[in-house]
Image (cartoon, rainbow, N blue to C red):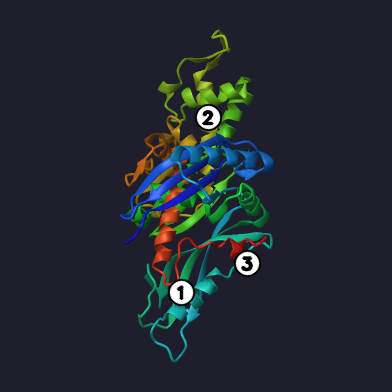
Amino acid sequence: MAKSSIHVGLEIGTSKTCMVVGEVKPDGSVKILGVGETKSVGVRKGEISDFHQVRTCVREALLEAEDVCDVDISSVVLAITGAHITGVNNRGTFRLPDDASEVEDEHIEEVKEIAQDIAIPAENVYLHNVVRKYMLDDQPHSTKPIGLIGKTLESDFHIIHGVRTRIQNSIKCVREIPLDVDEVVFAPIASAQIALNRERKAEGALVIDIGGGTTDFVLYLNGGIEASGCIPVGGDHVTNDIHLVTHIPLSKAELLKKTEGDVSGDPARSVGVVTVNDEKGFTESEIQRSLLNDVVRGRLEETFMLVKEKLPEGSLKSVGTGVFLTGGTSLMRGIGELANEVFGLPIYRPEQPEISGVQAYFRDPQYSTAVGLIRYAQVLEEEYRNKRDSKGLLNKLSKFLPF
């Protein structure tokens, strides 16, 4: 009989370092046991800029998570982001030998190796090799066409790779706590585990995770990943724009962004002024609401356009579900209207109906990546359990990221 298992997701973000502890029960449901969180220091645009400060942040998040959920944490599933990460599609073609007519396991492995054999920069390393579909004599198949009769076997893969040293630095930071790293996951793929179910992936959906320093995205079509990537722009850039235009301190610009900013473009929401008070409660300055909204809208509109430009031409026409916005910046007022203008698709927020536990945490979109790591680990565990030699999570780091 299957037992409950504990998984821990770790996100080292630009704004926060977050560690989520989840229990996967025998029936497949997930319960969030606790969250450890601290403000990130030493992270810029999703990447480590000060190793020692980041290590301290991870340790603080670990201590808080262990204290909250009363669990000894020894390993984590780690989210990775950064503009250095690239997603590409590639197709492999294999013609079955003349004495073979049915597709066998060995033919599948052969065509997979061909599809995954692409030239990447010498300083890069593979993060994910995700199968999109198979083709047998030009007929598409969503699963392995083993046992079917044919001659020409093809496989489409989405391959994600990034700079080896930058990924290693994140892993090294975790290992020095010390914690083991069970798996490394590109952040938007983790977020998609929360935002999308199998039906939404099949119908087509775009997930956009807008964090403090980066905007990550992943596009699913026909159940497979069509595109993925990272834009080095996020909510912190909006805050900085407000600071530069209004000359108010960054801390007050951040508060103004969250409490008063509106990016919908609705003229009715841009009437009047916003009062900024000093520490004693006296009026420090007044800012035209129209100016504030123009600033925040301009930056986020540019961000969405950058994501749109990264998508394959015409791919949005095949999206049958819509766009799912997550991440802390997705909480800004009017962002759904703006996204609808840019992408021309229905806009949704992720739901987590199969997860229970700490409501205040897992319902907040800024925790989608960390919670999604739990779901990702759950899927991997189920896949490996079905393999004959499976004994839990497979640690691929020794293969892809040798030290």
Query: Residue under circle 1?
Result: 154
Labels 1 and 3 touching (C-beta < 8 A): no
Identified by mark 1, the residue type is: Glu
Query: Label 2 is placed on what type of residue?
Result: Val
Residue at numbered disc 2: 296
Dot 1 or dot 3: first in sequence order is: 3
N-terminal of the pair, mark 1 or mark 2, is: 1
The residue carrying pointer 1 sits among few (fewer than 14), some (14 to 19) or many (20 or more) residues within 10 Å by Cα, namely many
Q: Amino acid at mark 3?
A: Ala
Is residue 50 something that shows in the picture?
no
In this view of the protein, which residue sits in the foreground, 122 or 227? 122
Report the mark closest to the observer, 2 or 3: 3
Give the left or right position of residue 148, taking residue 171 as reference: left
Residue 238: x and y in percent read 56, 31
Query: Measured along the vertical axis of the image, is residue 262 above or below residue 381?
Result: above
Considering the image in quadrants, where does the N terminus appear?
Answer: bottom left
Residue 27 appears in the rendering: yes
| Residue corresponding to mark 3 | 119
Left or right: 285 with respect to 143?
right
Residue 328, image x, y percentages? 48, 36
Label 3: which secondary element = loop
Q: Which quarter of the image is occupied by the C terminus?
A: bottom right
Identify the element where label 1 is drawn.
strand
Q: Position of residue 265 (x, y in %)?
A: 45, 29
Residue 339 lies, in percent from the top left, at 44, 39
Mark 1 to mark 3 CA distance (whole Å): 19 Å
Q: CA distance from mark 2 to mark 3?
A: 39 Å
Q: Is residue 77 left or right of residue 82?
A: left
Image: 294 above or below 98: above
Q: Nearer the viewer, residue 42 or 296?
A: 42
